[in-house]
Amino acid sequence: MNRRGNTKQPRTATLMLALLTSILAPAHAVAQGYPYLIFETADGTKTSVAVESLKLTLGTTTLTVGTKQFALADLTKMYFSATAVGSDAVEGDVNGDGLVDATDVSLTARHIIGHTADGFSSDAADMNGDGTVDAADLAAIIALAKTK
């Protein structure tokens, strides 16, 4: 019960509990194929952080994750993911392993013909930003894979 006589947990306490859970879960998450922790804010912005380099610092009104800082009041979701999103997503890295290689080329080609693999990132595959993954995007991923 809080000082107002309510038994409902404050949002900050709920978020702190979720943060503590996330601190204890990274090794298990990576082992299960979810190497990223995604933070979503009230405006819908999603930011990903690699679990293996996860360092959280909880302030009274902010959460610092590596070099990224979030206002606690703005955080709405936090979850593990197989692929990076937002600014951490590597263009062309459709499987989220941090590389653009033959695997990404193969997965993109299979996606185009209707065989989408689990964890496939359409955002990373849409190289020209037109909202669809097609042969033009595949050609760009092939070119990137050749340079890496």
Image: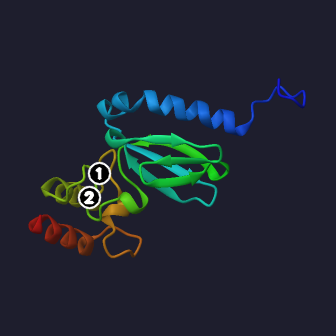
- Count of marks overlaid on the render: 2
State the image coordinates of residue 98 (x, y, percent, origin top left).
24, 53
Residue 25 sits above or below residue 48 on the image:
above
Colour scheme shown: rainbow
Q: Quadrant of residue 87?
A: bottom left
Quarter of the image that includes the N terminus: top right
Label 2: which residue? 93
Tell which of 41 and 111 is nearer to you: 41
Q: Secondary structure at mark 1?
A: loop
Tell which of 50 and 127 is nearer to you: 50
Three-letter amino acid code at the position of disc 2: Asp
Q: Residue furthest top?
A: 1
Residue 52 sits above or below residue 38 on the image:
above
- The circle drawn on residue 15 is none
Q: Would residue 9 be found to the left or right of residue 84 on screen? A: right
Label 1: which residue? 96
Three-letter amino acid code at the position of disc 1: Gly
Q: Residue furthest left?
A: 146
Tell which of 100 and 19 is nearer to you: 19
Q: Would residue 10 be found to the left or right of residue 84 on screen? A: right
Q: Would residue 81 be found to the left or right of residue 113 on screen? A: right
Whether tag 2 and tag 1 are in contact, CB under 8 A, the answer is: yes
- Identify the residue at horizontal 71%, vertical 39% (top origin): 11
- Identify the residue at horizontal 29%, vertical 47% (top origin): 117
State the image coordinates of residue 113 (x, y, percent, origin top left).
26, 59
Residue 44 sits above or below residue 20 on the image:
below
State the image coordinates of residue 66 (x, y, percent, origin top left).
41, 49
State the image coordinates of residue 2 (x, y, percent, origin top left).
83, 28
Q: Residue furthest right?
A: 5
Q: Quadrant of residue 77?
A: top right
